[in-house]
Every structure is written in C-alpha cells, then in structure tokens.
Amino acid sequence: MLRLYKYMSEDVALKFIKKPLLRLTPNWALNDPFECKVASTTNQKLNILDGNVERSIHTADFMGLHGIVSLSETPDNLLMWSHYADEHKGAVVEFLIEGADPLDMFNIGKCPTSSDAILGKVNYRKRRNYPFSVDVQSLDSIRTHYYLTKSDEWIYEKEHRFIIPGTEASYMRSSNQGLYSDLELNNEGLDNFTLIQSVDTKQNLWKYSKETQDMFFMDVHPRAIGRFIIGCNGDLDLYKKAMKEGELSGLGKTFASSVFNKFCDVEVSKIHPERFELTFEPLMDQVNNS
C-alpha cells in the first residue's frame, strides 16, 4: 500500500471533512507554466512521423482532455505547509492507495486503458525534451513523459500524480450556476458543488472551462482516507466543529465519533522544540466535550 499526502488550505480542508473531494486540475490551471508543454525538438520529431504534420497539435489536445490530482510522498515539508496549507493554518490529508488499482481511491467506474488514466511519480529534470526515440510506438510514453516531468527546482515536493480524463470528474463548482440551468446537473445540497451525471455534459464543461473558470472534482472513497493532520497554526475548534458536523452528514470519513467520544485518525502538528521540524500528535480531546 502506498501512502500519499495532500496539502490543503483551511477552507478546502474544512470542506473536505464534510465531503471528500479533490480537485482535478487542467494543466493550464496549474502553478507551473511548463506543465505538459512539449519541447520544440520533440514536436518537430512528432510532426515528421508518417507524414502527419499536425501530430504535435493532436498530442497536446489529447493531453488537454485530462486533469491532474497532485499528491506528495511526505506530510512534513515546511515549504509545502507554508505554500499549500495556508501558512500552517490548513491541513494535510493522508491517502491509502492500493497498488492493484490506484484509481479505486475514487468513486468512479473503470477507465479504459486508452484513456491515459494513471498514477505516476513525477520525474525532475533540467531539460524538457523526450529523451528516447520518437516513433509511433512511443506516443503513449511521450504523453506520460510530459504528464510526469517537471523542472528539478520542484524536487522538494516529491510529487506523485493521478492523470485522469476530465470526463471522470464527479462534481463541478461554478461561479455562475445560472449558465447551466438547462444542463443535467444536481447540487445535492452541497456547498457550491454540483454533481455532473452526463458524460456529454462533462466533455462540454471541461472544453470551455478555461473561459468559464469552472472547477472539477473527484469524489474520494472514505476507505482511502488515512490520517487528517491539522496545521500548527490551525483553529482546532473550527476543525472539531466541522468533524462533528461531518459525522452527522455521513458523506465522508468519520473523524469524530460521538459514540466512542473521541476523534479518530486526527493528529495535530507541533513545532519541534529544538529543530526546524514538525511533529504530529494525536488529537486526544473528547468529542462530546468539544
């Protein structure tokens, strides 16, 4: 079993407690402008294969149909706590990923093998070019290379990525729900999250999301969730309140058990007394007295 971690802001972490969703992010919306950008030399080699001068365009378009869920090998990186977890006010969530089928972490059907649905470890390099022979048989490998390759300046993140077709997203969040009054959508009573049921609807929404700024989310199975680690600057009362509300909703993992009067798999980050390190301690508060 692989254990990977997601750093979250306070707002995202509080929502995750009540309904475990992870954003499926298009490559254009990530914080690195080099994401999925094929090197010029590789594009030139693609365009001379079997006379298809637009193969590089088709490759980029196909990759653009997919989104990324980014996770990390480590829950205690100080920079990532500062950058991605709201200056230690947010949280880190642990995920338990089965090796046989990592996509079982999400509430989705089986993805076809032709869909580029993978979990892979990010490689860090100085150069962007595909370093092997470019031919028709290597097209899958070329796409995987660009999904999973970043500058070595990002190596501290120790990133693993799910690459998933946008049509597998379960939910969306839009700043203008009025645009979609005629589409097959259902908000399920969730705060600004809308269930997308039609594959055709998902395709159209994903296609125009750069213009609409819509966001897409994967539904995480509660059994794949391990520890919930609250940042050292986190508001414990706020998190405990959300966990008690989450127990009542029954939509995610039960972090607060009123029956046993304890918090389950919840830890609190503490500053090490001597070193530039964080330590994690179980949250021992009683649920019914919080």
Image: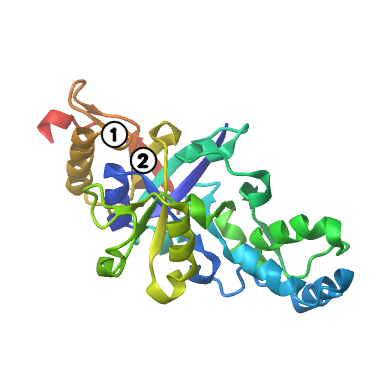
- The quarter of the picture where residue 183 lies is bottom left
Give the x, y percent position of residue 105. 49, 38
Camera sees residue 75: no
Looking at the rendered image, the quarter that the C terminus falls into is: top left
181 relative position to 127: left or right: left
Q: Nearer the viewer, residue 190 or 120?
A: 190
Going by the numbered disc 1, the residue's amino acid type is Phe
User: Could you classify mark 2 by the number of other residues whose Cα lies within 10 Å: few (under 14), some (14-19), or many (20 or more)?
Assistant: many
Q: Secondary structure at mark 1?
A: loop
At 21% from the left edge and 44% from the top edge, which residue is drawn? 242
Residue 88 is marked as: none
Give the x, y percent position of residue 239. 23, 45
> Mark 1 sits on what residue?
255
Q: Are marks 2 and 1 in contact (CB under 8 Å)?
A: yes
At 74% from the left edge and 73% from the top edge, which residue is drawn? 56
100 relative position to 201: left or right: right
Distance from the alpha carbon under mark 2 to that under mark 1: 8 Å
> Mark 2 sits on what residue?
228
At 29% from the left edge and 34% from the top edge, which residue is drawn? 255
38 relative position to 94: left or right: right
Counting residues from the N terminus, which is met first, the one under dot 2 or under dot 1?
Answer: 2
Looking at the rendered image, the quarter that the N terminus falls into is: top right
Give the x, y percent position of residue 168. 49, 50
User: Could you classify mark 1 by the number of other residues whose Cα lies within 10 Å: few (under 14), some (14-19), or many (20 or more)?
Assistant: many
User: Where 247 sits versus 211, above or below?
Assistant: above
Going by the numbered disc 2, the residue's amino acid type is Phe
